């Protein structure tokens, strides 16, 4: 159904994002950067959850590599870059290289290896950023790949992320070729 292209948050999702605000407000060190999937529901989640940081000089960047596993299901296909930028002016879409979604495929879902390659590319990018505290608004499937396929981590992080869940982790980068 084309009307669910890049589906927005439901009212329940908005309420779950609002519940993250007090958690972020209590953080002793706030994010110096917020990275968001360019999909509508993640953009909305991140902007609601990190609302207190908007207008504080903290960059909000959309990044193609933090998108959900996608393909076939049009709810995972992102809208054109210019439409997202017009709807979400608080977010910098400069990292998106194409107007249209070139990752999405109508004929198949991305493989776990393809998602893993995107996660790895994102981690390389993140490791070169100067910010030490970063908020990320992404998707449960992407986060599952982060902690089960790319990062060595505690078993508790390997569990499925619930909708609207936030976890704090410390990343140490050690890339192996």
Image: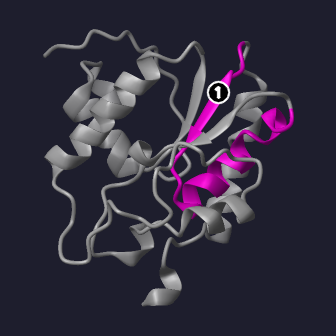
Inspect this view and state whether residue 103 appears: yes
Magenta stretch? 29-55
Residue 133 percent coordinates (x, y): 60, 17
Question: What residue is drawn where x is 26% and y is 70%?
Answer: 105
The x, y position of residue 103, in whole percent, is: 32, 60
**Residue farthest toward the front in the current orientation of the protein:** 98
Instruction: Kindly identify which residue carries mark 1.
Output: 33
Quarter in which the N terminus is drawn:
bottom left
Residue 45 is one of the magenta-drawn residues: yes
Look at 56% across and 54% down and name the residue there.
42
Left or right of 35? Residue 59 is right
Q: Can the viewer see residue 159 in this picture?
A: no
Q: Was residue 50 drawn as part of the magenta stretch in this picture?
A: yes
Above-or-below relation of 114 to 151: below
The vertical placement of 129 against 161, above or below, is above
Count the marks.
1
The quadrant in which the C terminus is found is top left
User: Tag 1, which secondary structure?
Assistant: strand
Residue 166 appears at what percent x and percent y?
54, 36
Residue depicted at x 53% and y 42%: 95
Q: Which quadrant of the view contains residue 100?
A: bottom left
Q: Is residue 160 above or below residue 147?
A: below
Q: Quadrant of residue 159?
A: top left
Q: Residue at x 62, y 70 (%)?
A: 10
The residue nearer to you, when weighing 165 against 38, is: 38
Pointer 1: residues within 10 angstroms few (<14), some, or many (20+)?
many
Q: Tell me if 22 is positioned left or right of 55 in this view.
A: left
Query: Viewed as shown, does residue 63 lie left or right of 8?
Result: left
**Front in this rendered view, residue 9 or 167:** 9
Give 141 or 94, whichever is nearer the viewer.
94
């Amino acid at each position: 159904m084309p009307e669910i292209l890049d589906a927005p948050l439901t009212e329940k999702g908005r309420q779950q994002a609002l519940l993250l605000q007090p958690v972020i407000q209590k953080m002793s060190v706030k994010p110096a950067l917020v990275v968001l999937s360019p999909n509508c529901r993640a953009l909305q989640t991140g902007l609601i959850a990190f609302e207190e940081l908007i207008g504080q000089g903290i960059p909000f960047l959309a990044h193609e590599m933090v998108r959900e596993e996608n393909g076939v299901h049009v709810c995972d296909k992102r809208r054109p870059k210019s439409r997202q930028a017009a709807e979400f002016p608080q977010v910098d879409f400069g990292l998106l290289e194409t107007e249209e979604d070139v990752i999405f495929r109508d004929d198949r879902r991305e493989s776990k290896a393809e998602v893993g390659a995107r996660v790895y590319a994102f981690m390389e990018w993140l490791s070169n950023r100067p910010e030490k505290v970063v908020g990320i608004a992404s998707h449960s499937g992407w986060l599952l790949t982060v902690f089960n396929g790319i990062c060595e981590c505690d078993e508790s992080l390997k569990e499925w992320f619930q909708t609207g869940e936030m976890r704090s982790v410390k990343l140490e980068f050690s890339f192996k070729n």
